[in-house]
Image (cartoon, helix red, strand yellow):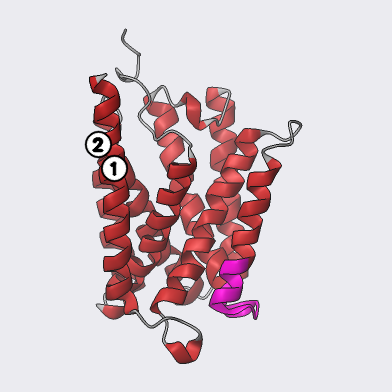
Amino acid sequence: MKNTDIEITGSKVAAVTFAFWVMKIAATTLGETAGDLLSMTLDLGYALGSAVLVAAFFLLLALQVSARRFHPALFWSVVLATSTAGTTISDLLDRTLGLGYALGSTLLATCLALILLAWRRSEGSISVSRIDSRKAEIFYWSAVLFSNTLGTALGDFLADDSGLGFAGGAALVGALILATALATRIRSISKVVLFWIAFVLTRPFGATFGDVLTKPLEKGGLDFGTLGSSLILFSILACLVTFSVLQRRAETAR
């Protein structure tokens, strides 16, 4: 059956399961360390780093949108691209342009709210279980990009300006994620709203936890550095994606 936008075979986005959230946190934490590796350790700077990573995001997005079915490796590559680009874009806004974490977060939150509102008005729902057209998919990935960029700014605010530090910020966001998960048991609260709250919160958790991994011991980190942390996180994410691919093939073969 042909759709007027694109012929789709099944859902093209990952199902929201416990494994989804584990992989999302791994991808967003890797996005933090890899973004810092590119912009700071390799000294490309936030502007050039953002340009390179946004270009990579659009290339991967084109492949994702043109695909006719769900490919786990491609899907998580796009998620990782949004997270990595979000790191440098947020740093560009907050540090290079001097907007600061509070104003930067406010602007990004406003952009995300407008995207979700436009998506809701256009498609009738912002549920990720209803990504059944090219237009809905573009809205989905736009929301993912801005939510990950917003999450970076929130994470940096918690780690640098709130006084909580990296570990304290990670603990606070982790508690908020747990509270959001528990709220799914309350029937009167929209599961779609809770999904997007959790989706945003996993990014500052990744940002603060990424700082815990990379920062030196005297600053409260574990001193793995941006390269070491990125390699560790990439290995974890690659193993999870490989398992997802093998599991999907086994289910298809039945």
Local secondary structure at mark 1? helix
**Which range is magenta?**
158-171
Disc marking residue 166: none
User: In the rendered image, is residue 22 in sight?
Assistant: yes
User: Alpha-carbon neighbours of circle 2 within 10 Å: few (<14), some, or many (≥20)?
Assistant: few
Q: Amino acid at mark 1?
A: Phe
| Residue named by callout 2 | 246
Q: Quadrant of residue 76?
A: top left
| Residue drawn at point x = 53 percent, y = 48 percent | 199
Query: Going by the image, does 24 lie left or right of 7?
Result: right
| Residue named by callout 1 | 243
Local secondary structure at mark 2? helix
Q: Is residue 162 magenta?
A: yes
Q: Amino acid at mark 2?
A: Leu
Q: Is residue 216 magenta?
A: no
Q: Position of residue 169 (x, y in %)?
A: 59, 71
**CB atoms at circles 2 and 1 under 8 Å apart?**
yes
Q: Position of residue 205 (x, y in %)?
A: 52, 62
User: In the rendered image, is residue 101 in sight?
Assistant: no
Kindly report the distance in space between the C-alpha atoms of the residues bearing marks 2 and 1: 5 Å
User: Alpha-carbon neighbours of circle 1 within 10 Å: few (<14), some, or many (≥20)?
Assistant: few
